[in-house]
Amino acid sequence: CTLDGYYLPGKGDGLRIETNNCTVSGLGIQRFPGNGIYISGDGNTIRACSIGTDGNTALPNGEHGIFVFGRTANIIGGLMDADGNAICASGGNGVLIQGPAASGNRVLNNRIGMDRNGIPRGNKWHGICLVDAQDTKVGEPARGNWISANGKGGIYGGGNLNSTTIQGNLIGTDITGFFGEANAECGIELTYV
C-alpha cells in the first residue's frame, strides 16, 4: 500500500499518529509537502516502510521523513533486518526526535539516505537528528542503522541527551562498510545548547 501526496496542497503529512501502541508495516509514503510520518503518541512501531522512495526512484517528502515530537517508547525499525525502513530524499532530516518529553525511543535496522537497493538518495539535512531526546537508542549491536549520503551529518544530537546510546551503525559507508558513501558533514556530532 502506498500513500502519495503529489496532489495534496498546503503542508499536509503523509501519516499522523496521535494515539498510542499502533504498528505501521510495509507502507510507502511519498511526495507529501509535510513530513512522511508525524508521531505524537507513545509506544508506536514503524517497520518495513519506504519513505521518500518507491524502491527505485527518489520521491521526496517536503519536511522530515519521520518526526517524533515529545513522546516515548516509539520504535522506528525493529529487531530484525526485515523490520528496517528505507528513509530517503526528505527535505529535512531523515528521522527527527525532539522535545523535552521525548525519551525511550529506538531507531534500529534502518537505511537512512539509501534506498533498499543501496542507491544513495540522501535526506537534505541530517540522517538522524536528536534534540532533547533522552534515553534514545540509535542502533544496537547487530541492529545498527545504515546512515549515508545525507546533506548534513549522519547523526546530530543537541540539548539534553542523557542516557542516549549510539552503537552498531554504518555511517558514511556503503552496505559492506568498506567503501565510502559519505554524509556531507560530521559522521556524529553531539552538542549541548
Image (cartoon, rainbow, N blue to C red):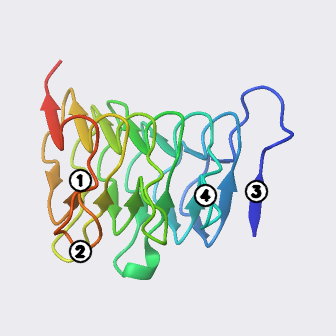
Query: Mark 4 to mark 3: distance in Å?
Result: 11 Å
Q: Residue at x 66, y 63 (%)?
A: 28
Q: Counting other residues with Cα less than 10 Å from the Cα at mark 4, is it few (<14), some (14-19), or many (20 or more)? A: many
Upstream in sequence: badge 4 or badge 3: 3
Q: Amino acid at mark 2?
A: Thr
Q: Is 64 placed above or below 193 here?
A: below
Please report contact status of discs 4 and 1: CB closer than 8 Å, yes or no: no
Q: Amino acid at mark 1?
A: Gly
Please report contact status of discs 2 and 4: CB closer than 8 Å, yes or no: no
Q: Residue at x 54, y 34 (%)?
A: 91
Query: Mark 2 to mark 1: distance in Å?
Result: 11 Å
Q: Amino acid at mark 4?
A: Thr
Helix, strand or loop under label 4: loop
Please report contact status of discs 2 and 1: CB closer than 8 Å, yes or no: no
Upstream in sequence: badge 2 or badge 4: 4
Q: Which residue is mark 1?
A: 172
Q: Which residue is mark 4?
A: 53
Measuring from the top left, give residue 46's x and y in whole percent.
52, 63
Helix, strand or loop under label 3: strand
Residue 3 numbered tag: 3
Upstream in sequence: badge 3 or badge 1: 3
| Viewer-side residue, 8 vs 135 | 8
Q: Which residue is mark 2?
A: 176
From the viewer's perspective, is the residue at label 2 or at label 3 nearer?
2
Query: Mark 2 to mark 3: distance in Å?
Result: 31 Å
From the viewer's perspective, is the residue at label 3 or at label 1 nearer?
1
